[in-house]
């Protein structure tokens, strides 16, 4: 069953616990760029790194998190972020225990700092 948009927005705003500045700073670090699956386009960028850039755009576009200000592209990406973060948080406890783990770095690329939760 597909979650309705309001649920996706609420879950995104709950699970993304990094603000745009924190995420931008993190994505600029070398350890961010090397964590996760590489995209198929030959760019060398990871899927999570690209996701992080999209999350920054969403956060900057709507800093007050007004549900009426998100467009469908935003919500579609928010849905991916929520699914990814929930799945990885459920599978792996190492992200909280080891901030240097691949899992923790990958979650940060997706806007969730496991050390904050």
Image (cartoon, helix red, strand yellow):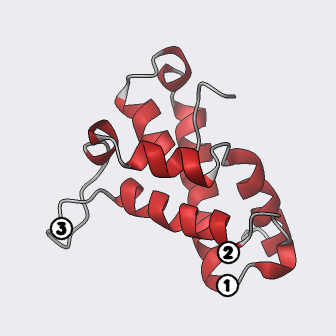
Q: Are marks 1 and 2 in contact (CB under 8 Å)?
A: yes
Alpha-carbon neighbours of circle 1 within 10 Å: few (<14), some, or many (≥20)? few
Please determine whether, in this image, residue 96 is positioned above or below residue 20.
Answer: above
Q: On the picture, is 74 further left or further right than 50? A: right
Tell me, yes or no, if residue 24 can be seen here: yes
Q: On the picture, is 17 further left or further right than 6? A: left
The residue where tag 3 is placed is 43
What residue appears at the point 73 percent right and 68 percent down from the top-left corner? 1
The residue where tag 2 is placed is 75
The residue where tag 1 is placed is 72
What residue appears at the point 67 percent right and 73 percent down from the top-left corner? 61
Spot occupied by residue 41 in the image (x, y as percentages of width and height)? 19, 73
Alpha-carbon neighbours of circle 3 within 10 Å: few (<14), some, or many (≥20)? few
| 3 or 2: mark nearer the eye | 3
Of labels 3 and 2, earlier in sequence is 3
Q: Are marks 3 and 1 in contact (CB under 8 Å)?
A: no
């Amino acid at each position: 069953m597909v979650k309705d948009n309001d649920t996706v927005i609420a879950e995104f705003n709950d699970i993304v616990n990094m603000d745009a500045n924190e995420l931008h700073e993190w994505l600029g670090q070398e350890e961010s760029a090397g964590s996760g699956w590489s995209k198929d386009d030959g760019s060398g960028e990871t899927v999570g790194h690209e996701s992080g850039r999209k999350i920054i755009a969403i956060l900057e576009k709507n800093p007050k998190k007004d549900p009426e200000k998100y467009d469908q592209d935003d919500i579609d990406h928010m849905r991916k972020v929520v699914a990814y973060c929930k799945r990885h948080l459920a599978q792996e406890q190492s992200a909280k225990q080891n901030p240097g783990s691949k899992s923790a770095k990958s979650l940060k690329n997706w806007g969730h700092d496991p050390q904050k939760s």
